[in-house]
Image (cartoon, grey):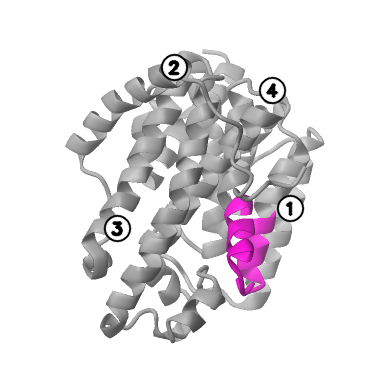
Amino acid sequence: MSSSTSADQGLFDHAKKTIAVGSKSFAAAARLFDPVTRRSALMLYAWCRHCDDVIDGQQLGFAAVALDSEEHQLRLVQLYDRTRAAYAGQAMSDPAFAAFQEVALRHGIPQRDALDHLAGFAMDVQGHIYQTLDDTLRYCYHVAGVVGLMMARVMGVKDEATLDRACDLGIAFQLTNIARDIVEDADMGRCYLPREWLHELYIAPEQLTAVANREVLAVLARRLVALAEPYYQSANAGLAQLPLRSAWAVGTARNVYRQIGVRVDRLGAKAWDTRVSTSSLDKLRLVLQGGLTALSARGATWPPRPEQLWQRPR
């Protein structure tokens, strides 16, 4: 095996390990991609996971270490610098950035998309306060909607209408994440819920971790899950524009993540007793369902994207 081939395999192995530990939900769906798309999708995921871990002081989403403001800012600047260097074609020693460089340059991912993603981490570093629902949706765009855009480009999408649908799916994923992780985020001093919602229900951000407030949290989570639904529905229209295996993978990821939101809603005040996830049996069922979702999307007549949905910047 040549050194170049060995290096390429090393990057892919690193990406496979990252997704296997960092997101079992996406790992199950990613197996459905064709080999070329799977490599790029996993390596893009590895970069996104790495950036998240760097800012949170985590390892593959676990074991967070407290960082002071100066260290947070330093790490953020380094992420920006290394991302720009990757686009400039400079040699990358970090496997996450080497992987991202390959994907970004091969698929023509605009640098703006990558920098928009880092802007979401900047919002965390700066302790951004989300006063309105629009503020929360803007955060969802930066940390997840733009990932949908980049993933769609990996699958060959170029038209703006389909990119809108990919962004909608990312936003739906993040709304589900926020609902599931209200308590976990609050433990880290973060609150992505609109302050307007908290004021309406007479609860302060620092009170979100109290077990006595779980009924109120259930109300807030239910709103988020309901809010995510039209974004999940909008994303279905984009599946018809993807290659069939990609549509199957994305449809599966959609169904797996949507199921997490459904479970949070059903569990009510008990949703934060343990971290909500899907079982292996559930994932198998949702993989099969994802295939049906992909096929049905091809035969459907889709209405225009609803105007009331949050619109990504152009």
Q: Amino acid at mark 1?
A: Tyr
**Residue 25 — which label?**
none
- Mark 4: few/some/many CA within 10 Å (<14, 14-19, 20+): few
Boundaries of the magenta span: 119-142
* Secondary structure that dominates the magenta span: helix
Say which mark, if any, is on residue 106: 4
Q: Is residue 137 magenta?
A: yes
Q: Is residue 153 left or right of residue 19?
A: right
Up-down relation of residue 247 to residue 118 (above or below):
above
SS type, badge 3 = helix
Position of residue 201 relative to residue 175, above or below, is below
Between marks 1 and 2 in the image, the one whose residue lies nearer the viewer = 2
Label disc, if present, on residue 245 of the rendered structure:
2
Earlier in the chain: of badge 2 and badge 4, it is: 4
Categorize mark 3 by other alpha carbons within 10 Å: few (<14), some (14-19), many (20+): many
Q: Nearer the viewer, mark 2 or mark 3?
A: 3
Residue type at tag 3: Val
Residue located farthest toward the right when viewing the structure as drawn = 88
Measured in 3D between alpha carbons, the distance from the residue under mark 2 to the one under mark 4, in whole angstroms, is 20 Å
At x 43%, y 60%, the residue is: 224
Q: Give the residue number, with chain letter if any, for mark 3.
A: 264
Q: Locate residue 261, reporting x and y percent.
A: 34, 52
Inter-mark Cα distance, 3 to 4? 38 Å
| Residue 110 horizontal/vertical position (percent) | 75, 35
Quadrant of the drawing holding the C terminus: top right
Query: Does the magenta-highlighted stretch encompass residue 33?
Result: no
Please tell me which residue is depicted at 29% across the width and 58% down the height of the picture.
Answer: 265
Q: Looking at the image, is mark 3 or mark 1 earlier in the sequence?
A: 1
Disc 3 or 4, which lies upstream in sequence?
A: 4
Mark 2 crowd level (few <14, some 14–19, many ≥20, 10 Å Cα): some
